[in-house]
Image (cartoon, grey):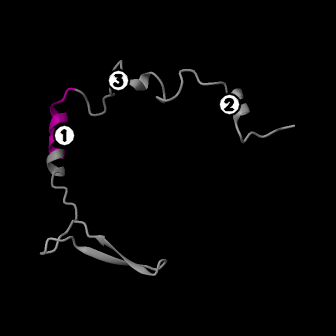
Amino acid sequence: MITHISCCFRQHRKYSKRGHKYTTFAVKEKKTYTYVPNMIHKVVQHFAVCAEPLTAPVKMSPTDPRKKRKTLGSPDTPPPTSSLAKQSRFKLELE
């Protein structure tokens, strides 16, 4: 946040045509991202000396939960679609 000399946050006002009133919000500082060049340099240096290529597949752990089920909250065997259709509130009755 940008502050004044008096150490309070600098405010900006904005008029709302819909509400016909002014609202205020704090003015934020522009981001500088001074760490990005150093981070890119470290990544390039790491992959320059690394034996694996950058596009190497990731090896999954045997205990990784993604190997067990597609969704963690689902039962091991899903119920049949016909029973789900019977329970549905929005089923279409075709006669």
| Residue 84 percent location from the top left of the image | 68, 31
Q: Are marks 1 and 3 in contact (CB under 8 Å)?
A: no
Cα distance, mark 1 to mark 3? 22 Å
Q: Residue furthest left?
A: 5
- Residue 88: name its quadrant: top right
Q: Residue furthest top?
A: 62
Which label is found at residue 84?
Answer: 2
Q: Circle 3 sits in a helix, a strand or a loop, which is it?
A: loop
Q: Circle 2 sits in a helix, a strand or a loop, which is it?
A: helix
Which label is found at residue 20?
Answer: none
| Residue 53 percent location from the top left of the image | 26, 30
Q: Earlier in the sequence, mark 1 or mark 2?
A: 1
| Residue that appears at 19% across and 34% down | 47
Q: Amino acid at mark 3?
A: Met
Q: Circle 1 sits in a helix, a strand or a loop, which is it?
A: helix
Cα distance, mark 1 to mark 2? 50 Å
Q: Amino acid at mark 2?
A: Leu
Instruction: Pick the quarter of the image with the C terminus.
Output: top right
| Residue that appears at 48% across and 28% down | 70
| Residue holding disc 3 | 60
| Residue holding disc 1 | 43
Magenta stretch bounds:
40-51
Q: Earlier in the sequence, mark 3 or mark 2?
A: 3
Near-viewer residue (44 or 89): 89
| Residue that appears at 72% across and 42% down | 90
